Amino acid sequence: MQTDIRPILEEAARSGGLLTYQELAQRAGFPPPHTIHKTTTALEALMAEDHAAGRPLLAALVVSKATGVPAPGFFGCLTTLGRYFGDDRGAQAERHWRRELEAVQTAYGVG
């Protein structure tokens, strides 16, 4: 599924925008039920792919509508990849997300 979302996230990166999980699910055309679960599964696979290739993590562009930052699963995946060791919520998590986001923006000429 990650190949379905990469072009969407690359477009968002080039435009300097963020997407909510729901917006990404809609743009990718993930059918119900469990569209958000399908979206997060695709994002985690994309994170692993980007990490293995030494690329910035496009998944940093996807945020929760309620909080404006990625969901706790984003930080859990970062921990699994060895890129972050800390709480999945709070100031430390938000600072780390902002660094990941800045890397994406820089790579796509936005930051």
Image: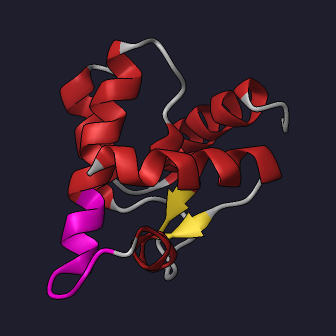
Q: Considering depth in this image, is 110 or 7 the residue closer to the camera?
A: 7
Q: Considering depth in this image, is 5 or 88 the residue closer to the camera?
A: 5
Q: Residue furthest bottom?
A: 32
Total numbered badges shown on the rendered structure: 0
Q: Give the percent coordinates (x, y) of residue 29.
A: 38, 75
Q: Give the percent coordinates (x, y) of residue 43.
A: 33, 50
Residue interval drawn in magenta: 30-40
| Location of residue 22 by image quarter | bottom left
Lateral position of residue 16 relative to residue 58, left or right? right
Based on the picture, tell me whether residue 109 belongs to the magenta stretch: no
Q: Considering depth in this image, is 35 or 79 the residue closer to the camera?
A: 35
Q: Is residue 76 in sight in this rendering?
A: yes
Q: Residue furthest left?
A: 33
Q: Quadrant of the C terminus?
A: top right
Q: Residue furthest right?
A: 110
> What residue is shown at x 69% (from left), y 46% (from top)?
13
> What residue is shown at x 54% (from left), y 26% (from top)?
56
> What residue is shown at x 66% (from left), y 28% (from top)?
103
Q: Give the percent coordinates (x, y) of residue 23.
A: 51, 77
Q: Is residue 87 in sight in this rendering?
A: no
Based on the picture, tell me whether residue 32 belongs to the magenta stretch: yes
Q: Give the percent coordinates (x, y) of residue 19.
A: 58, 67
> What residue is shown at x 32% (from left), y 26% (from top)?
49
**Colour style of the rendered protein structure:** secondary structure
The correct choice, above or below, for 64 with respect to 54 in the image is below
The correct choice, above or below, for 105 with respect to 87 in the image is above
Lateral position of residue 34 relative to residue 66, left or right? left
The correct choice, above or below, for 42 with respect to 37 in the image is above
